[in-house]
Amino acid sequence: MGTSMTPDEEPLLSIRDLHAHFETDDGIVRAVDGVSLDIYRGDVFSVVGESGSGKSVTAMSILGLIPTLKVDSGEILWKGENLLEYSDVEMGAIRGGEIAMIFQDPLTALNPVHTVGRQVGEMARIHEGLNKKQAMARAIEMLDLVGIPEAGKRAHMYPHEFSGGMRQRAMIAMAVTCNPDLLIADEPTTALDVTIQAQVLEALIAIKDEIDSAIMLITHDLGVVAGLSDRVMVMYAGRQVELGTVDELFYETRHPYTLGLLGSIPRLESDDTAPLIPIPGSPPSLINRPTGCPFHPRCAFAEVPGRCDSEVPELRSVDSSSHTAACHFAEQLRDVTLDDLRERVEKVAAEPQAPDLIEVNDS
Amino acid sequence: MTNIPPGTDPTDPNSSGHEIPETAGDTVTDVPQLTAARPLRVDVWRRFKKNRLAVAGLTFIVFLFLVAVFADFVAPYSFTERPGSAVGAFRQSPSSDFWFGTDSIGRDVFSRIVYGARVSLRIGVLATTIALVIGLALGAVAGFFGGLLETLIMRVTDIFLAIPYIVLAVAIAAVFGRSENAIIVVLGVTGWLGVARIVRSSFLQLKQLEYVEAATSLGFGRARIMFRHILPNALQPIIVYGTIAIGSTILAEAALSFLGVGPQDPTPAWGLMVSQGKGDLANAAHLVFFPGAAIGLTVLSFVLVGDGLRDALDPRLK
């Protein structure tokens, strides 16, 4: 794994400096603020971040699925063509045909009034013009491919007669029916039992190899990322903070936020009973973002006052051209270990100027 | 090599790697017992059967349909024949010859009520169908597309709702003339308001759901999403409303016939028969009673069936 990327190959999908916002009653929400990435055929590209970090919005913007999202600048290049300039009709052919999406909750993402087979087959009817009978045959074939036993019988059942894991398999079958080049999976296992998650991910990866596509995997589970991905992008407050191969991200972390994520994972295999290192505070509002680096109020290494709260860090290459990070002090992080992080976090927490739990202001 | 959280060592993922399962089925453990799929309608019928009143209503409606279809065999006379005039039986009370009596010109009331079932059911079903089609189309468009289109459609609905339908119907009837077909049009174009509002609110709710978003993400067209994915999920309240609406349309037809805006004599419309008999209420009450009872029973049956369907379609209501 991790070697399918060849530098001379053209990327399937290439996002160039994408900026997009929502207009709400409370103000402008900069949901995507400078994201650039390349996804190559065969890749498993993961996007990691907390809720509200803009990872789902970034993925949905590829297919133009959020009508209220306004794109300010940037390009979404699909096989060299800018999808942002496509009409709705042109996008219809891309959606499902070339890029397909797998949703988080298979319970709500399947239509309760149609049989599973009919829904899976509908893809082939639309994009390939099959008739009803051919579509059902294709649906059964696809359901079988994603590992649903007795697919012939189950194709005639309704979603409510399926278990959670089977529903998610059916969603995957639906998404891959027309052999898309890119599968976008938005937290595909979050709604499933832990015992089922690995199975579903396995089916997903197997099918990716079968149809020779790429996967954009949106998740907040670093364990999944470590096990399956080739490359990883970490997002925070709508910004891309670090991007690199799995090895680079896990072993040569160059952003304090990534380090924080790694520190907050429970480690079963460690001998010591060291407690987890939580990231203090909570993600910032995307309307009133902190000045400078958006992570600085929660960062154990921030230089405040200084560059961190005054200057927005540029995304730049560190160590290798494929590894980028947006931190003023990325190079200094080279020698920092998780133990250093723990020390720092504990020191900051012990300081008397820790914020009050409740603060009441006259406003 | 720093910062290694052992639990997330990428060389040793705790998910069992990603070899392609040879026979994918072998790896699946989350398989429930395969029971025979039971179609929804079987469940609905089972629950419907428990409601005795609804079953009684349905029985009456089926009976009425049969009577309407086979009126030529059921009725002893045609609705224009005047068998009473030959034997001097005008406004005669029910007897073994004339089960429901005779009217002022000697026609057999029973035969006229039997043929009247045709008129009422035809008007009720066709007018309701027109109302459903208009209401569905407008409500679906308003709910799905929103924006200016929605505002426009819903304000027109509000304006129509503000005018009493009888006044509107009388006005439209004045334009279309006073025939059976005219009254179908009249009731159809005044009946869609409620449907449009129900459909719009269902669509507003359903278009937010993830399976609609999923359908969009898979490249399904708008028309397909509206009619194949949202509409079937919105049908339940429409079925209930439509059933009750047939009853209320028959009642409205009777009211308009009574007012003289509906079909004209000799059409055996029940409302018209009540209207013609009202002058003889004191000495020949059967002229009002039988057509009145026919209207009442028919409307009641449709309402009972509608109520039964609502309970049967939504198992949470009980």
Image: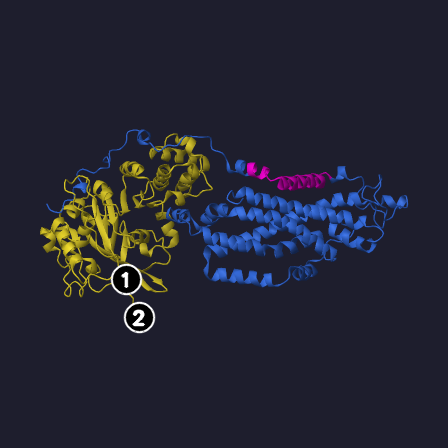
Chain colours: A yellow, B blue
Which structural element holds mark 1?
Answer: loop
Q: Chain of mark 2?
A: A
Q: CA distance from mark 1 to mark 2?
A: 13 Å
Amino acid type shown at disc 2 = Asp
Residue B294 included in the magenta stretch of the image: no
Q: Could you tell me residue A87's position as x and y percent? A: 37, 55
Instruction: Name the foreground residue: A275 vs A27.
Output: A275
| Magenta extent | B45-70
Badge 2: residue crowd in 10 Å (few <14, some 14–19, many ≥20) = few
Residue drawn where x is 80% and y is 48% of the image: B286
Q: Could you tell me residue B304's position as x and y percent? A: 63, 45
Q: Could you tell me residue A8's position as x and y percent? A: 17, 46
Circles 1 and 2: CB distance less than 8 Å? no
Q: Chain of mark 1?
A: A
Q: Which residue is mark 2?
A: A362
Q: Which residue is mark 1?
A: A358
Q: Is residue B182 left or right of residue B87?
A: left
Determine the image quadrant of residue A236: bottom left
Identify the image quadrant of the N terminus of chain A. top left
